[in-house]
Image (spheres, rainbow, N blue to C red):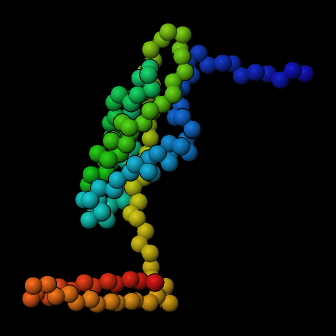
Amino acid sequence: MKKEKKPEQFIRHPSYPGGIEAMRAFIKMNLRYPEEALKNNVEGTVSVAYEIDHLGNVIDAKIKGGIGHGCDEEAMRLARMLKFGVPKHKGLRVTFHKTINIHFRLPAIPKPSSNTQLVYSYVEKKKEGKASYNYNISVN
Protein backbone atom coordinates (compact mmCIF):
# COMPACT_ATOMS: atom_id res chain seq x y z
CA MET A 1 0.00 0.00 0.00
CA LYS A 2 1.50 3.33 -1.09
CA LYS A 3 1.41 6.39 1.10
CA GLU A 4 -0.71 9.13 -0.43
CA LYS A 5 0.96 12.44 -1.12
CA LYS A 6 -0.71 15.68 -0.28
CA PRO A 7 -1.45 17.72 -3.38
CA GLU A 8 1.08 20.50 -3.85
CA GLN A 9 -0.45 23.93 -3.45
CA PHE A 10 -0.33 26.14 -6.48
CA ILE A 11 0.65 29.18 -4.42
CA ARG A 12 2.97 28.68 -1.46
CA HIS A 13 2.81 31.13 1.40
CA PRO A 14 5.74 33.27 2.54
CA SER A 15 7.60 32.29 5.68
CA TYR A 16 9.83 34.16 8.06
CA PRO A 17 13.48 32.98 7.84
CA GLY A 18 14.08 30.77 10.85
CA GLY A 19 10.40 30.14 11.49
CA ILE A 20 7.93 31.47 14.00
CA GLU A 21 10.40 31.28 16.90
CA ALA A 22 12.86 33.51 15.03
CA MET A 23 10.07 36.02 14.36
CA ARG A 24 9.11 36.07 18.05
CA ALA A 25 12.76 36.61 19.00
CA PHE A 26 13.04 39.45 16.46
CA ILE A 27 9.94 41.16 17.85
CA LYS A 28 11.08 40.71 21.45
CA MET A 29 14.52 42.13 20.65
CA ASN A 30 13.19 45.17 18.74
CA LEU A 31 10.13 45.99 20.86
CA ARG A 32 10.37 49.38 22.56
CA TYR A 33 7.69 49.81 25.20
CA PRO A 34 6.11 53.27 24.69
CA GLU A 35 6.72 55.80 27.47
CA GLU A 36 3.05 56.75 27.65
CA ALA A 37 2.04 53.11 28.07
CA LEU A 38 4.61 52.69 30.86
CA LYS A 39 3.34 55.79 32.68
CA ASN A 40 -0.28 54.59 32.46
CA ASN A 41 0.51 50.90 33.19
CA VAL A 42 -1.04 49.79 29.89
CA GLU A 43 -0.80 46.12 28.93
CA GLY A 44 -2.52 44.20 26.19
CA THR A 45 -2.34 42.76 22.72
CA VAL A 46 -2.32 44.69 19.46
CA SER A 47 -3.53 42.89 16.35
CA VAL A 48 -1.95 44.09 13.10
CA ALA A 49 -3.08 43.08 9.59
CA TYR A 50 -0.35 43.46 6.99
CA GLU A 51 0.36 42.72 3.34
CA ILE A 52 3.47 41.04 1.95
CA ASP A 53 4.51 41.78 -1.63
CA HIS A 54 6.14 39.38 -4.11
CA LEU A 55 9.61 40.32 -2.77
CA GLY A 56 8.79 39.51 0.87
CA ASN A 57 8.51 43.11 2.08
CA VAL A 58 5.64 44.33 4.26
CA ILE A 59 3.96 46.98 2.13
CA ASP A 60 0.93 47.89 4.22
CA ALA A 61 -0.02 47.51 7.87
CA LYS A 62 -3.28 48.37 9.63
CA ILE A 63 -4.42 48.01 13.22
CA LYS A 64 -7.27 45.52 13.62
CA GLY A 65 -7.45 45.77 17.41
CA GLY A 66 -5.41 48.25 19.41
CA ILE A 67 -4.87 49.39 22.98
CA GLY A 68 -3.61 52.94 22.35
CA HIS A 69 -1.02 54.87 24.40
CA GLY A 70 1.61 54.48 21.66
CA CYS A 71 1.41 50.67 21.53
CA ASP A 72 -0.46 50.67 18.21
CA GLU A 73 2.23 52.74 16.51
CA GLU A 74 4.98 50.53 17.94
CA ALA A 75 3.22 47.38 16.72
CA MET A 76 2.91 48.85 13.21
CA ARG A 77 6.59 49.82 13.25
CA LEU A 78 7.55 46.25 14.17
CA ALA A 79 5.27 44.75 11.52
CA ARG A 80 6.82 46.97 8.83
CA MET A 81 10.30 45.80 9.85
CA LEU A 82 9.52 42.14 9.09
CA LYS A 83 11.06 40.59 5.98
CA PHE A 84 9.76 37.28 4.64
CA GLY A 85 11.09 34.65 2.28
CA VAL A 86 8.71 34.18 -0.64
CA PRO A 87 8.93 31.17 -2.96
CA LYS A 88 8.69 31.69 -6.71
CA HIS A 89 5.16 31.54 -8.14
CA LYS A 90 5.73 30.76 -11.80
CA GLY A 91 6.01 34.41 -12.76
CA LEU A 92 3.01 35.60 -10.74
CA ARG A 93 3.28 38.57 -8.43
CA VAL A 94 1.17 37.62 -5.47
CA THR A 95 0.31 39.81 -2.47
CA PHE A 96 -0.31 37.94 0.77
CA HIS A 97 -2.44 39.11 3.67
CA LYS A 98 -1.45 38.08 7.19
CA THR A 99 -2.25 39.06 10.78
CA ILE A 100 0.07 39.15 13.76
CA ASN A 101 -0.66 39.69 17.45
CA ILE A 102 1.98 41.66 19.35
CA HIS A 103 1.78 41.40 23.13
CA PHE A 104 2.69 44.29 25.37
CA ARG A 105 3.45 43.20 28.94
CA LEU A 106 4.91 45.51 31.55
CA PRO A 107 8.45 44.58 32.55
CA ALA A 108 8.64 42.65 35.80
CA ILE A 109 10.13 44.56 38.71
CA PRO A 110 12.21 42.27 40.90
CA LYS A 111 11.04 42.08 44.50
CA PRO A 112 13.70 42.41 47.19
CA SER A 113 14.35 39.22 49.08
CA SER A 114 14.36 38.96 52.86
CA ASN A 115 18.17 38.88 53.01
CA THR A 116 18.61 42.12 51.05
CA GLN A 117 21.34 44.36 52.37
CA LEU A 118 21.61 48.02 51.55
CA VAL A 119 25.10 49.41 51.38
CA TYR A 120 25.55 53.15 51.52
CA SER A 121 28.77 54.99 50.86
CA TYR A 122 29.42 58.68 51.19
CA VAL A 123 32.27 60.63 49.65
CA GLU A 124 32.91 64.33 50.19
CA LYS A 125 35.10 66.25 47.77
CA LYS A 126 36.19 69.86 48.12
CA LYS A 127 36.83 71.81 44.95
CA GLU A 128 37.58 75.51 45.02
CA GLY A 129 35.92 75.99 48.38
CA LYS A 130 32.76 74.11 47.34
CA ALA A 131 31.82 70.71 48.69
CA SER A 132 30.44 68.10 46.32
CA TYR A 133 28.94 64.86 47.47
CA ASN A 134 28.77 61.47 45.79
CA TYR A 135 26.40 58.83 47.06
CA ASN A 136 26.60 55.20 46.01
CA ILE A 137 23.73 52.94 46.96
CA SER A 138 23.94 49.28 46.10
CA VAL A 139 21.43 46.54 46.81
CA ASN A 140 22.73 43.01 47.29
Q: How many marks?
A: 0
Q: Quadrant of residue 43?
A: bottom left
* Residue at image location 41% in from the left, 72% down from the top: 109
Q: Nearer the viewer, residue 13 or 80?
A: 80
Q: Please tell me whether residue 128 is drawn above or below residue 40 in the rendered image.
A: below
The residue positioned farthest toward the top in the image shown = 91
Left or right of 52 in this view: 126: left
Task: Please state the horizontal and vertical placement of residue 111, each as a whole percent of the image.
Answer: 44, 79
Q: Is residue 10 visible?
A: yes
Task: Please state the horizontal and vertical placement of residue 65, each as a whole percent of the image.
Answer: 35, 45
Q: Nearer the viewer, residue 66 or 138?
A: 138
Task: Please state the horizontal and vertical placement of residue 125, each as a whole percent of the image.
Answer: 20, 87
* Residue at image location 38% in from the left, 37% down from the top: 81
Q: Please tell me whether residue 43 is drawn above or below residue 31 in the rendered image.
A: below
The N terminus lies in which quarter of the figure? top right
* Residue at image location 57% in from the left, 38% down from the top: 18
Q: Quadrant of residue 87?
A: top right
The residue positioned farthest toward the right in the image shown = 1
The residue positioned farthest toward the front in the image shown = 128
Task: Please state the horizontal and vertical placement of residue 118, each as a whole percent of the image.
Answer: 40, 89
Q: Please tell me whether residue 32 is drawn above or below residue 64 in the rendered image.
A: below
* Residue at image location 50% in from the left, 90% down from the top: 115
Q: Is residue 49 visible?
A: no
The residue positioned farthest toward the left in the image shown = 129
Q: Nearer the viewer, residue 139 or 48?
A: 139
Q: Please tell me whether residue 12 is drawn above or below residue 31 in the rendered image.
A: above
Q: Nearer the viewer, residue 66 or 102?
A: 102
Left or right of 4 in this view: 28: left
